[in-house]
Image (tube, helix red, strand yellow):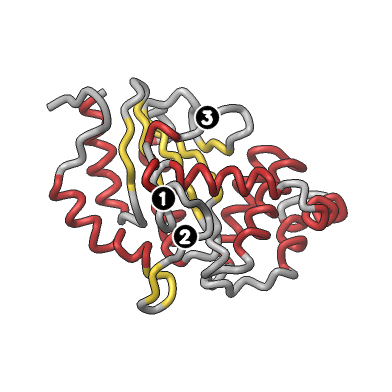
Amino acid sequence: MRMDKNLYIPLAILVAGGLVAGALFMSRGDKPADTGSLTGTETNASLDNVRPIDETDHILGNPDADIIIVEYSDTECPFCKQFHNTMHQIMDQYGADGKVAWVYRHFPIPQLHPNAPKQAEALECAARIGGNDAFWKYTDRVYEITPSNNGLDMALLPQIAAEIGLDKVAFEGCLNNGTTKERVDADALNAVEVGGRGTPTSVLITKSGKKALIPGAYPYQNMVTIIEEALDQI
């Protein structure tokens, strides 16, 4: 069945994935993620509000892929850490032949993870200094070493930059000056505008412009099912 507007994702997928995806609201024990201070316009959320992908975005894979997954993520969210690994698996399977590309955007939730906004700025500083490849190397390393839930030692941020070959002094200058904060804030606002209420929030976009919200850290096999369903509808 082909849909005229947003992609149809079978109920069975949502039910199965939702058991894990529901955890996106549960970053600390039984306390739901609070996004109330990010915006007051959640009722106007729409997938049509996804900011168009452009040269400033961080893209892994072919920008002209059949499917692009735009992820809005928080580096200190444990479910984002899990989903980061899942997305790398997805790219290993679907990225090489141009079926899927991955766009990373920022959605730090300071109410739960006070250090996440500055970490997001650090990711942007890596991109500003070293380009797209440096962004992904830096981001991968942050997710690799953070224990999540605001557990990453912030003193490690410049060290990670040096580890991946960036100019540490230039990186520290970028981070200390807050030069990338505006971009982080814009990403976070856009996440809420598309319907994000927790992390990770992703939007699947097909080449023909159909969109589907992926609200949470769906496991690898669920993501495969969703992607295959979307590919069948292109």
Q: Mark 1 or mark 3: which comes first in sequence?
A: 3
As measured in the structure, the alpha-carbon distance from the residue carrying label 2 to the one carrying label 1 is: 9 Å
Mark 3, residues whose alpha carbon is within 10 Å: few (<14), some, or many (≥20)?
few
Q: Mark 2 or mark 3: which comes first in sequence?
A: 2
Residue matched to label 3: 53
Residues at discs 2 and 3 in contact (Cβ within 8 Å): no
Across and down, in percent, residue 181 comes to: 70, 50
Residues at discs 2 and 1 in contact (Cβ within 8 Å): yes
Specify the quadrant of the image occupied by residue 31.
bottom left
62 relative position to 160: left or right: left
Residue matched to label 2: 35
Q: Nearer the viewer, residue 156 or 54?
A: 54
- Tell me what residue is drawn at x 66 percent, y 51 percent: 123
118 relative position to 169: left or right: left
Quadrant of the drawing holding the N terminus? top left
Quadrant of the drawing holding the C terminus? top left
Across and down, in percent, residue 157 comes to: 72, 62
- Label 3's element? loop
Query: The disc labelled 1 sits on which kind of residue?
Result: Gly
- Tell me what residue is drawn at x 49 percent, y 28 percent: 62
Across and down, in percent, residue 8 comes to: 20, 35
Query: The disc labelled 3 sits on which kind of residue?
Result: Ile
Res. 196 mark: 1
As measured in the structure, the alpha-carbon distance from the residue carrying label 1 to the one carrying label 3 is: 18 Å
Does residue 9 sit above or below 2 in this rendering?
A: below
User: Is residue 90 visible from the viewing direction of this image?
Assistant: no
- Tell me what residue is drawn at x 80 percent, y 50 percent: 174
Query: The disc labelled 2 sits on which kind of residue?
Result: Thr
- Label 2's element? loop
